[in-house]
Amino acid sequence: YKSPVVPIKTASKSYRGIGEGVTFPAAASFWGRWAPPNERASLAAFSFSGAQFGTIISMPISGIICEKLGWPSMFYIFGSVSCTWVILWFIIAQNSPAEYKSIDQRELEYITAELPTSKDNKKSVPWKNIFCSIPFWSIAITHLCQGSTNIFSSPSGRHLTQNRNFRIKIDMVLNRIVEGSSIFSKNQNLNLF
């Protein structure tokens, strides 16, 4: 008898990856149409920091919810919040500033005046330069390492709670140090800190 757990979990993680995989490219495309070029990098970095901020906030809250209401309630609560956010996003967000009905006319003029107007000057992507770029590889390796921390979060939580008598809330807080430092480093140019 072979357990169906591994194939089901693999398929589930694969579907999740396919769904989440479009998030950052879609956000980059969104900022390409909404942000003036001189503000684009800062706005994108700030919005991408939301992933780490959400993790920093949700993990300690998850620990509290698990302790007070039981672990299944965590999924219902965060699932409800996520569904509400998606509905609001579909109602409010627009593909371009021109499509957004509530935008101030001065803001619309400012954004559209700064955006490139011609799509005729498409250039080929310099793949060789990208893959030979030290900054590219440093970012790629950093993201790989940062993603690897998520793999170890769950087993380390189990180990600490079962073998070292840690409380779940404390483990959730300790596991968020990486995300906190990531937000700090991404947003240095915004003078938030």
Image: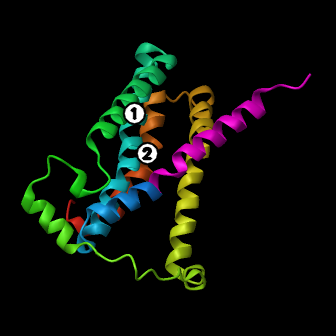
Instruction: Reply above or below: 132 against 23.
Output: below
User: Which amino acid lies under the numbered mark 1 shown in the image of this protein?
Assistant: Pro
The main secondary structure of the magenta stretch is helix
Question: In this image, 170 relative to 148: left or right?
Answer: left
Q: Where is residue 98 in the image (x, y as percent from the top left)?
A: 22, 57
Q: Name the residue under label 2.
A: 176
Q: Residue at x 45, y 23 (%)?
A: 74
Q: In this view, does 47 lie to the left or right of 145?
A: left
Q: Which one is in front, 132 or 58?
A: 132
Work out which residue is located at the far right of the displayed protein and give it: 1
Q: What stretch is highlighted in magenta?
A: 1-24
Q: Which amino acid does label 2 sit on?
A: Arg
In contact (CB < 8 Å): disc 2 and disc 1 = yes
The residue beneath circle 1 is 60
Judge by depth and name the residue closer to the eye, 53 or 11.
11
Q: Where 10 sits versus 74, above or below?
A: below
Task: Give the quadrant of residue 5.
Answer: top right
Question: Under tag 1, what secondary structure?
Answer: helix
Residue extending furthest front?
A: 120
